[in-house]
Amino acid sequence: SQTIHQWPATLVQPVGSPLSLECTVEGTSNPNLYWYRQAAGRGLQLLFYSVGIGQISSEVPQNLSASRPQDRQFILSSKKLLLSDSGFYLCAWSVVESYNSPLHFGNGTRLTVT
Amino acid sequence: AQSVAQPEDQVNVAEGNPLTVKCTYSVSGNPYLFWYVQYPNRGLQFLLKYITGDNLVKGSYGFEAEFNKSQTSFHLKKPSALVSDSALYFCAVRDPRGGADGLTFGKGTHLIIQP
């Protein structure tokens, strides 16, 4: 069966520090991968998605970037964190080219920028 | 552009009573519709989906949802609520003609089941 791992679960970082959140998927090949941010425990904002290695689409221009160095690895990064980057970050995967398949989410990373 | 509305921020139901969480959508073609549940500090869990066919779809944990094309709605239902159903529920839509850019989610509805 497929599983998705996100780490760390929680992170407290000072303003101006770098960020690296990692997500890996097991049990499937060539998945679509997604990064979402959830603010204040409510709505989800799509940040980035990827349909293959090295292919990143950005939905919202901001202080973050994403990379996909391997088929089942998706990384969210920032060179300098802002207070507004605080939130709950969720990684998700879906079957490629099957738009009726659901997204499967990791357990998220709670980021607090101080 | 596709969109989803969940008109209720919070729904309160007594344990054992039926529950409904409302969702309406807007999409130019025939929609793919999904419901997810989120427990505190956890990721979203997939409950059920409507793609085509029978308007009543059944999902995990006894939940079901009814697709109504004329009302552009996809309400989540359960005949008898449990306290453990208390969580944040998200409706989501995808236009089948769209690309790989995921789903469009509603803002979520807090479901509170009172003992």
Image (spheres, coloured by chain):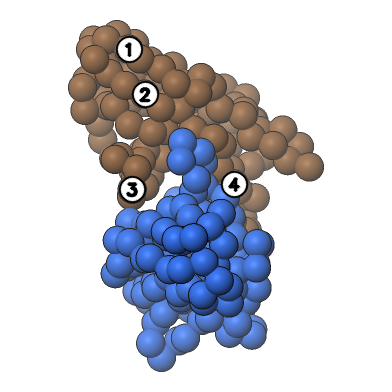
Q: Quadrant of residue B9?
A: bottom left
- Sequence-wise first label, 3 or 2: 3
Q: Amino acid at mark 2?
A: Leu
Residue bearing the label numbered 1:
A13
Identify the subunit bearing mark 4: A
Question: Tag on residue A111?
Answer: 2
- Proximity of marks 1 and 2: CB atoms separated by less than 8 Å: yes
Give the percent coordinates (x, y) of residue B57.
Answer: 62, 76
Question: Tag on residue A104?
Answer: 4
- Sequence-wise first label, 4 or 3: 3
Identify the subunit bearing mark 2: A
The residue lying at 38 percent from left, 57 percent from top is B110
Question: Tag on residue A42?
Answer: 3
Q: Amino acid at mark 1?
A: Gln
State how far apart marks 4 and 3 are (Cα). Answer: 18 Å
- Looking at the rendered structure, the number of numbered marks drawn on it comes to 4
Q: Nearer the viewer, mark 4 or mark 1?
A: 1
Identify the subunit bearing mark 1: A
- Mark 1 lies on a secondary structure that is strand
Q: Amino acid at mark 4?
A: His
| Horizontal side of residue A10 vs B66, given as left or right | left
Chain brown in the figure, letter = A
State how far apart marks 1 and 2 are (Cα). Answer: 8 Å
Q: Amino acid at mark 3?
A: Arg
Residues indicated by labels 3 and 2 sit on the same polypeptide chain = yes
- Sequence-wise first label, 4 or 1: 1
Give the percent coordinates (x, y) of residue A69.
Answer: 57, 22
**Residue A88 vs residue A102, the one in the foreground:** A88
Question: Tag on residue A94?
Answer: none
- Sequence-wise first label, 3 or 1: 1
